[in-house]
Amino acid sequence: MTYLAKPKLHHPTLPKNKLGFTRRDYEGAISTLCAGCGHDSISAAIIQACFELEIEPHRVAKLSGIGCSSKTPTYFLGSSHGFNSVHGRMPSVVTGANLANRELIYLGVSGDGDSASIGLGQFAHCMRRGVNMLYIVENNGVYGLTKGQFSATADRGSKSKKGVANTDASIDMVMLALQLGATYVARGFSGDKEQLVPLIKAAIEHRGAAFIDVISPCVAFNNHPGSTKSYDYVREHNEAVNFLDFMPPRAPITTEYEPGSVQAVMMHDGSTLVLRKLHADYDPHDRIAAMNHLAEHEAKGQVVTGLLYVEREPEDLHANLNTVDAPLNKLGERELCPGAATLEKFNASLR
Ligand SMILES: Cc1ncc(C[n+]2csc(CCOP(=O)(O)OP(=O)(O)O)c2C)c(N)n1
Ligand code: SF4
Ligand SMILES: [Mg+2]
């Protein structure tokens, strides 16, 4: 059995959003992951974010690759579109789907094995092309599904459950996303929902390639002393660059923070991301500074979390390719077959 259906019974007093949906309407099947797996907390954060953003579930397309992390879309947004692709191939499937229909909200869920090894090339091109999506890597430093081999994000020197040290250099997906041109880049921790939910909400509203690396401990194979992706390690070494609140355009914007400690980031649709700053010098609009900040703190053994970078006016793949607005399945024969004269004119323009 790959999943268990959840009973649809709701408590009548559960709070509803403006669409009349409760949080439970954004859930999926019962999770079959190990109890305590960080991935389940990320699913809960996605459910919370979509409920609070008042998203109609049928407007979301959730796509994934292969791994425990890639199984999770079954456990949230049970009424949304879903596609469980081949190992490491989620990005190209999202790219195609997005080009065919830009009206959906695209949510790609992957693992560190899925995205930093077999799917690394796919990840790279998806980010550099600016596919309008939220790409989440549920990062536990191991291949959980295949019993805990080191993944490419495992830190050099970190230890496996059996005490063997990893000798390979690690890939930092956040650094890579920054270098590749992603226009929204953040890192969260599955154990910190207060930080993760606003990060997800703002990323969903971002029109461009949004990437969130979420450290997500694997309780079965990577949650022991010597691991740098365990609950204890991340709690002890977490260095948050900012605290966040996300306000959709319809909510009145209030400042409840001390002047000077708040930075409001306007998103493309008029919504506001409020950064409650921990570090007065941290500027989330400076890509190079974000990379330097990451490198400096990683050298000290610190895991930097929060919103590292957001571009004020992002452009996505559709803007760059100048594509038609309408989903391709809504185009009629006239638009799809404009006739021999138009084809001749087009061919002439290429000569
Ligand atoms: C082409 C192919 N190669 C290898 C595998 C075996 N395999 C399944 S999941 C996986 C790694 C999953 O790791 P990750 O993406 O980190 O997910 P996690 O289970 O840790 O959440 C591998 C190597 C496969 N399914 N397909
Ligand atoms: S093996 Fe690890 S990643 Fe997979 S469900 Fe269990 S705890 Fe989660
Ligand atoms: Mg993994």
Image (cartoon, rainbow, N blue to C red):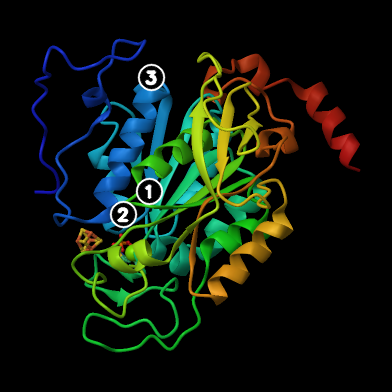
Q: Which residue is drawn at 24% across and 64% down?
A: 145
Task: Give the x, y percent position of residue 83.
Answer: 35, 41
Tell me the kind of residue under disc 2.
Ser
Mark 2 is surrounded, within 10 Å at the Cα level, by few (under 14), some (14 to 19) or many (20 or more) other residues, namely many
Q: Which residue is drawn at 59% across and 63% down?
A: 175
Question: Which image quadrant shows ligand 3?
Answer: bottom left
Residue carrying label 3: 56
Q: In this view, does 197 lie to the left or right of 43?
A: right
Please determine whether, in this image, residue 263 is positioned above or below residue 175.
Answer: above
Tell me the kind of residue under disc 3.
Glu
Earlier residue among tags 3 and 1:
3
Label 1 close to label 2 by CB (< 8 Å): yes
Under circle 2, the secondary element is: helix
Residue carrying label 1: 64
Task: Give the x, y percent position of residue 114.
Answer: 40, 62
Spatial separation of the CA atoms under disc 3 and disc 2? 24 Å
> Disc 2, ligand 1: is the CB inside 8 Å?
yes
Q: In which quarter of the image is residue 344?
A: top right
Tell me the kind of residue under disc 1.
Ser
Residue in the foreground of this view, choosing between 230 and 333: 230
Label 3 close to label 1 by CB (< 8 Å): no
Q: How many marks?
A: 3
Under circle 1, the secondary element is: strand
Task: Give the x, y percent position of residue 170.
Answer: 49, 76
Under circle 3, the secondary element is: loop
Nearest to viewer (mark 3 / mark 1): 3
Residue carrying label 2: 69
Spatial separation of the CA atoms under disc 1 and disc 2? 8 Å
